[in-house]
Image (cartoon, helix red, strand yellow):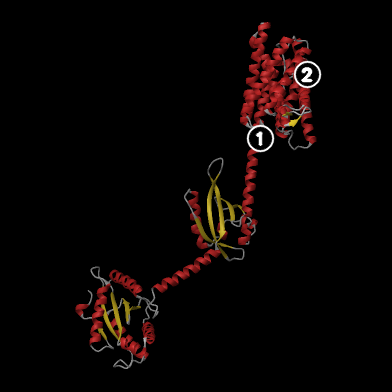
Amino acid sequence: MIANSDGLKSNASDTPTLLRLLKVGFALLLLSTFASVVNERSRIMGGVSIIWLSNGLLIGVLLCAPRKHWASYLALGYLVDFGVNVGLGNPAGISGYLSLCNMVEVAVAAHLTCDAISEHPDLTELRQLRSFLLYAVLFSPLLASAMAILGWGAMRRGVFFHSLLIWFAADVLGVATVTPLYISFHHRRRFSNLPMLETVGLFLGLIAVSIFVFDFAKVPLVWLVLLMLILIGSRVGFTGSALGLLLVLFIGGLSVLFGRGPLNFALNGSLSSKIFMFQVFIFVSMLALYLTEVAMARSARTRLRLEASETRFRLLAEASRDMIVLAGLDGERKYVSPAATELLGWSQEELLRGSYLDIVHPEDIAKFVAMLGDCREGKETGSLSYRCRKQDSTYLWLEANVRLFRDTSTNEPAGFVYVKRDISERKVAESKLQDAFNTVEQLALVDGLTGVANRRLLDETLGREWARAIRDGTLLSVLLIDVDYFKPYNDLYGHLAGDTCLRALANAIQVILRRPPDLLARYGGEEFVVVLPNTPHAGAEAMSERILQAVEQCCIKHAGSPYGNVSVSVGCATGFASLESDPNELLKAADLALYRAKAAGRNRAEVATTELLVN
């Protein structure tokens, strides 16, 4: 809102500026006068109206202007149109009615087309071009032509359909050529970034070809004109197509009007029929050009989207610390991100010359190939950890996530996209964690005092060896060892000395167990168990004697023992395992034998009697 000289507020944007109205009015005056003179000349010579230009310009002006300005432009258009008609000697009543028909055409075309296209019209989009052709080029001229001929026919009583066609054809060509040209210039989509010399040369070539074809040629060569128009459209763009079509319309129309060119030689009819055929040629050329422009623009937009997508992909890939690889189905690499050089030391060019077979660790190739096969079949692959050879011949742990990509046209598998990251630090951490777990697991199976197996490991080993003895049909022997007079030893020397004594005895017994399957375990308190897989009765008895000797050689003083040193008693049991029994029966037999050894005076070994053996 601004204040006028009277201090009143008015909205300056409700109407276009005076300078803008003068420019549009002058352009409408030129086009209306030119078209009226040419069309009048044609009618004098027995022809019909060739083209009406001002409606096309005014439709373009409305499409590019705010709706609140439309009334001003329509009023201006009506005054110019009415003035030109009256100035050329037409009656005021007829001139006023025909000018009204023209404004109805412009208003309807602008209203329907504006609702169907974007705020910034782009007729290279198929949807917008379709709306423009349907509403502005066909429907609105047909409506205005019918109104004009009905009113004209009521006064002149002429032939309705013939007159309708004459008016309609002239308006169609004017709207189809001038409106796109104005829209392109208004939005500064004038010409492509061609050198000025090439642009001028193309239009001069079109003018020369048009003059030759329509003025001098004796045979129909109009296809040369269409060829030049398509060439200009492909090089200059949509604006070039519209301007070129307008130039051809002027040159060809004047040639036909003055009886020159191939149409006059090829057709023997009236001037009206020759002009109509020329209008048909222009209309067909217009459709061909505009549809070609739509196809080219769609291709260009697709190319730009692809280029933008590729640019975004490259920015992401090159900024990422993860290694991104694009490879074909045969494993040949198509793209490798710069992170590959940082991780592996290989240059991108070196990696592009090879495949995964060159750098994947031989032990990991099989699972790598299996992952690619699953991915190709559409299965979920997850991630794969594998070793990759670096340039210095060392190996780096990588984690790869792979996805299959397909050809956009055939939807057939085209290759793989890998995203790989360095997991060396994670692998080191996992290794340390596994070592710690193994240590904890080991501690869970070892007696904390003596360092030999604990009761848990004893139960697991005895159960496993019992099952093996059943399967192989072998003997299994068990020795149950008890330290003699151990409570008096603790009372005399203290619990710390007792612990030291147990450790010494465990070490002495462990030394003589040389077979890997043999196991020494602490059974509880001062008791130990020795498991001897695949050992007969004689072997178990011999091992018992060796244990007695090993303990005796320790020479651990024990004032509370009648033997003067620490000694042990051993109960030995041997038998065949069976599904009907369990290892506890063998331990019970060894325990009974131990009881007899203690009852017989200790420091000795006793073997389970025949009736106690497990059979």
Q: Quadrant of the N terminus?
A: top right
Q: Nearer the viewer, residue 602 or 74?
A: 74
Q: Secondary structure at mark 2?
A: helix
Position of residue 381 measured from the top left corner of the image (x, y, whole percent): 48, 53
Label 1 crowd (10 A; few <14 / some 14-19 / many >=20): some
- Quarter-wise, where is residue 476 in the image? bottom left
- For marks 1 and 2, give the CA distance: 33 Å
Is there any visible trace of residue 280 in the rendered image?
no
The answer to which image quadrant residue 178 occupies is top right
Q: Is residue 194 above or below residue 289?
A: below
Instruction: Indicate the position of residue 236 as horizontal and vertical percent values.
Output: 73, 33
Q: Amino acid at mark 1?
A: Ala
Residue furthest toward the front? 7
| Residue beneath disc 2 | 34
Q: Position of residue 587 (x, y in %)?
A: 27, 76
Q: Which residue is mark 1?
A: 297
Rendered residue at 62%/51% (across/down): 316
- Local packing at callout 2 (Cα closer than 10 Å; few below 14, some 14-19, many 20+) is some
Question: Which numbered disc flags the more N-terminal residue, 1 or 2?
Answer: 2
Q: Answer with left or right where residue 76 lies relative to residue 398.
A: right
Where 357 falls versus 93 (above or below)? below
**Furthest residue toward left:** 611
Q: Amino acid at mark 2?
A: Phe
If the image is split into quadrants, where does the C terminus sit? bottom left
Q: Position of residue 405 (x, y in %)?
A: 54, 47
Q: Nearer the viewer, residue 14 or 195?
A: 14
